[in-house]
Image: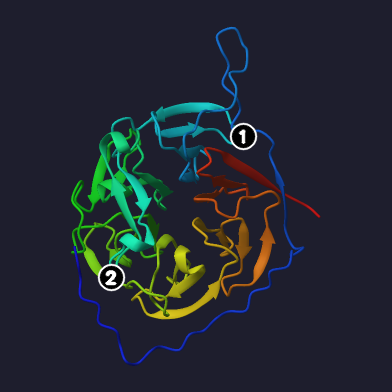
Amino acid sequence: MSSVMIRSLLLPLVVVAPVAFGQPAEIGYRLVKEWPKQAKSAAGTPAGPWNFIQVPGVAVQPTAGRVIVLHRGAHPVLEFDSDGNFARSWGDGLFSFGKVVAIAPGDRRPGGSGYSAVYGPAGCDSCGAHAVRIDPEGNVWLVDACAHAVYKMDGQGRVIMTLGRKGFSGISRAEFNLPTDIAFAPDGNIYVSDGYGSARVVKFSARGEYLLQFGKRGTGPGEFGLPHNLAVDAQGRVYVTDRDNRRIEVFDSSGKFLRQWPTASGVSGLFLTKEQRLWAGSTLYELEGKVVSRLPQGDPGAHGIAVSASGEVYLGLLSGKVQKFVPVSR
């Protein structure tokens, strides 16, 4: 698959927000030692830590307060209460068995993606699971990177809308190539980062109608190495973690590049709080790029992030763990 890249002769002005990498003192957090709680045998004996294979995403349902853990294995969608007690699981058979893999530099075509996928026995159970998000109406959305599809689910775990063509990769309006995340604008529009195989963000209406797209592969302003996660603020500005270029880029609702700031490492996870602050990895930013706080013992490479209404922070890690942090007074 190939596409023609047209590079403009007039490069936009790059606005880099200043970032302080010291430890701020405004907000503090404490790591909860064991979350979720261990299951118990019929005899009441703890069964040991949960056997999550990899945890690419976490989400918190705002009304029920349940924490959704997305992992790459059997029963890929698990729900817990905020204390870590198991509630239910679902999603078997929903996700592809494909696995995203990096392409060795010597095997890459010039200007091409650094990622591909393998399928079947070389993959793993539900390895396509990549992100879970909850929209303002409380619907659960799941990203299956290797199926090139994004699913909107109802409360019974049934697919009620699909973005992309399941099992078909592409760069058209109707297709994705290893998509990574989804975000929701205040006006109901939807953004999908696409992703590993492409290097763009695609915008849809709330009904799933294509509206526009922006971005291309590169290192310049408005370009992406890997658009990995998304968030949209109250003003409709779109924040994208460009993981391979170690930065966060900001766009307006039409895809116009506004500014960027560097991150200390290649950040994956992104989450916008109700206070209009941005979690990126284990660091909390103001929307201009100023560091507000960092999570003690938090993994800066967290693949997924979610925050509850009371400010509890959950990190999904590819090491197969979930970290929970609670805010504390300093």
Numbered circle sitting on residue 213: 2
Q: Nearer the viewer, residue 209 or 200?
A: 200
Classify 10 Å Cα crowding around label 1: few (below 14), some (14-19), many (20 and above).
many
Q: Which of 50 and 62 is in front in this view?
A: 50
As helix, strand or loop, the secondary structure at mark 2 comes to: strand
As helix, strand or loop, the secondary structure at mark 1 comes to: loop
Q: Which of 186 and 147 is in front in this view?
A: 147
Residue 181 coordinates in the image, percent (x, y): 38, 55
Does residue 157 lie above or below 146 as drawn?
above
Instruction: Please indicate whether residue 12 sits to the left or right of residue 21 in the image.
Output: left
Q: Earlier in the sequence, mark 2 or mark 1?
A: 1
Mark 2 and mark 1: Cα distance apart in space: 39 Å
Residue 98 coordinates in the image, percent (x, y): 30, 42
Does residue 9 lie above or below 148 as drawn?
below
Residue 157 coordinates in the image, percent (x, y): 33, 35
Q: In which quarter of the image is residue 4?
A: bottom left
What residue is disc 1 on? 35
Does residue 133 lie above or below 68 as drawn?
below
- At label 2, which amino acid type do we have? Gln
**Residue 129 in view in this figure:** yes
| Residue at the limit of the structure toward the front, as seen here | 106
